[in-house]
Amino acid sequence: DTAVSQTPKYLVTQMGNDKSIKCEQNLGHDTMYWYKQDSKKFLKIMFSYNNKELIINETVPNRFSPKSPDKAHLNLHINSLELGDSAVYFCASSQFMGIHNEKLFFGSGTQLSVL
Amino acid sequence: QKEVEQNSGPLSVPEGAIASLNCTYSDRGSQSFFWYRQYSGKSPELIMFIYSNGDKEDGRFTAQLNKASQYVSLLIRDSQPSDSATYLCASPGGNRDDKIIFGKGTRLHILP
């Protein structure tokens, strides 16, 4: 009965490979996000979706492609992985978007290590 | 570009003392702030939300917002070793395509 679940928890792969991270929320929220947290713990938004519609698309290489088949799921596909992609990727959801009390619920994170 | 600034620390506080964490922000239009706690290797979890000027208390935690000076703080009374974590200040947007901006976090270490 985990609220926001993402898989896998750990992902170790070689440079140049393609990988995907999946996220699902059972909170009935309309909005989902991908955040990247680097080694210095800085948490930066990558994408947000509201009811399957892409709302925020930060300055992220186009090797990163999010997909939201429905409002409960948001996946992240990464092509041609690079060393600099190594980080923890967090999925999150919120009930609303663009209001002042928009609380985020985070998944447990995916530790991506590119060798 | 909206910014939320925090001292990265580490901030070391003796057990039982008050831990004071601060955050400043650049956007005068920011209306509200969140404090998230993140244990090492875990995901951020929401601990406080403040919207109005002044203080908001929840158990051992007090959030303070001063819109005139553009700072927000989190006080933790009777600090416990279990409070050792990174504390992230965040400001949500007021518009649909606004981003939630996080500070870089302050590492808090409670000394037993």
Image (cartoon, coloured by chain):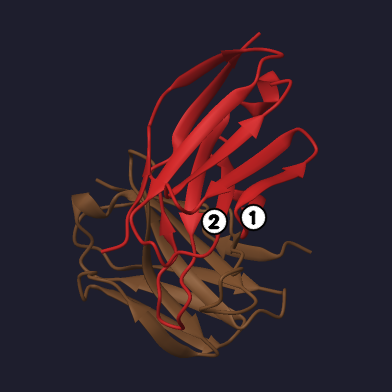
Chain colours: A brown, B red
The label shown at residue A114 is none
Residues tagged by mark 2 and mark 1 found on one chain of the structure: yes
Q: Nearer the viewer, residue A53 or A65?
A: A53
10 Å crowding of disc 1: few (<14), some (14-19), many (20+): many
Left or right: where A19 falls relative to A59: right
Q: How many angstroms separate mark 2 from mark 1 (CA)?
A: 6 Å
- The chain carrying label 2 is B
Which residue is painted at 39% across and 42% down in the image? A41
> With respect to residue B46, does B104 lie above or below?
above
Tell me where residue B9 appears, x and y as whole percent. Answer: 40, 25
Pick out the residue farthest to the front: B68
Which image quadrant: the C terminus of chain A?
Answer: top left
Q: Are dots 2 and 1 in contact, CB under 8 Å?
A: yes
Q: Earlier in the sequence, mark 2 or mark 1?
A: 2
The label shown at residue B49 is 1
10 Å crowding of disc 2: few (<14), some (14-19), many (20+): many
Which image quadrant: the N terminus of chain A?
Answer: bottom right
Res A86 seen here:
yes
Q: Which residue is mark 2?
A: B33
Tell me where residue A35 appears, x and y as whole percent. Answer: 42, 61
Which residue is painted at 56% across and 28% down in the image? B20
Secondary structure found at label 2: strand
Mark 1 is on which residue type?
Phe
Tell me where residue A73 appears, x and y as whole percent. Answer: 57, 79
> With respect to residue A94, does B35 lie above or below?
above
Which residue is painted at 52% across and 89% down in the image? A69
Mark 2 is on which residue type?
Phe
Secondary structure found at label 1: strand
Quarter-of-image position of residue B51: bottom right
- The chain carrying label 1 is B
